[in-house]
Image (cartoon, rainbow, N blue to C red):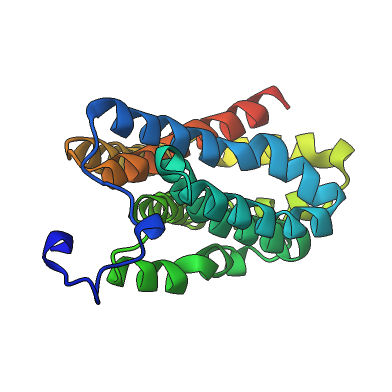
Amino acid sequence: MLSETTPQTRLPEPLIVDSDGPQAHRLLALLAAVFLVSVPVFIQAPLVRLQPWVSLLTTPVWLLSGVALLRQPSLRLWGDLAIGFSWTWLAGSLYWGWLRENPYVHLPVEAIGLPIVIVLLSQNRLIVGSYFYLGSLLGTAITDLYFYWVDLIPYWRQMMQVAPTDAGAVLQAALLQLENPIAITRATILLGILVCVGGWSIKSNKTHWWAFAGAVLSTILVDALFLLAATLA
């Protein structure tokens, strides 16, 4: 336990965020996680398409902002989350900026922060942000699994290659691929997994599990937005 560590082994205080906060603290972590998962859809996606280097160079801004917030006792939660979010921002910048035409490397690139997160968790540091990152990565993995499971990968590649004016036709073709009982059943199964994992996490009184739940459950929101876009295209 952290309380049992000696002065020599105690972790630097700014890197430790109380994970047993009050209900309001946990709710803030959940809502912040939902917001941070949604940010790439509305902000990073258009930015990285037009100015990938700007998006990539924004990563240290998130990282340094997180470090600065960690130094303020009342803002440590936000600093923790900002640092966890910086790994997802970095991955999004790299993949959607230069590698988006290759869906097979999407998940490996999204996992670029995983070694860092594993080290941090092994040292009991930045737990809330690390769990946010893991929840976001799990949501991404399940979404990618669905693309493979219902054979949407060819449409993914087409979307990344066609002009924006032709994207609607590709989205409509992809939507037709989903209009069958098998695709709907598989979507329901994966949706159930997301809901169960998110619901189980919220039962915890640990702030980091609520951040994890927010990232997992917001995957449903983001995927629903993409489905709506395909429907309206």
Q: Residue at the location (39% across, 59% down)?
A: 15
Q: Residue at the location (79% across, 45% down)?
A: 47
Q: In this view, does 212 lie to the left or right of 98?
A: left
Foreground pick, 17 / 9: 9
Q: Is residue 81 left or right of residue 122?
A: right
The spot of residue 117 in percent (x, y) is 41, 66
Q: In this view, does 160 lie to the left or right of 153?
A: right
Foreground pick, 160 / 181: 160
Q: Is residue 5 left or right of residue 223?
A: left
Foreground pick, 54 / 25: 25
The spot of residue 97 in percent (x, y) is 76, 59
Regarding residue 110, the answer to whether it shows in the image is yes
Q: Residue at the location (34% across, 46% down)?
A: 212
Q: For the N terminus, which image quadrant?
A: bottom left
Q: Residue at the location (30% across, 71% down)?
A: 123
With respect to residue 91, does 72 lie above or below? above
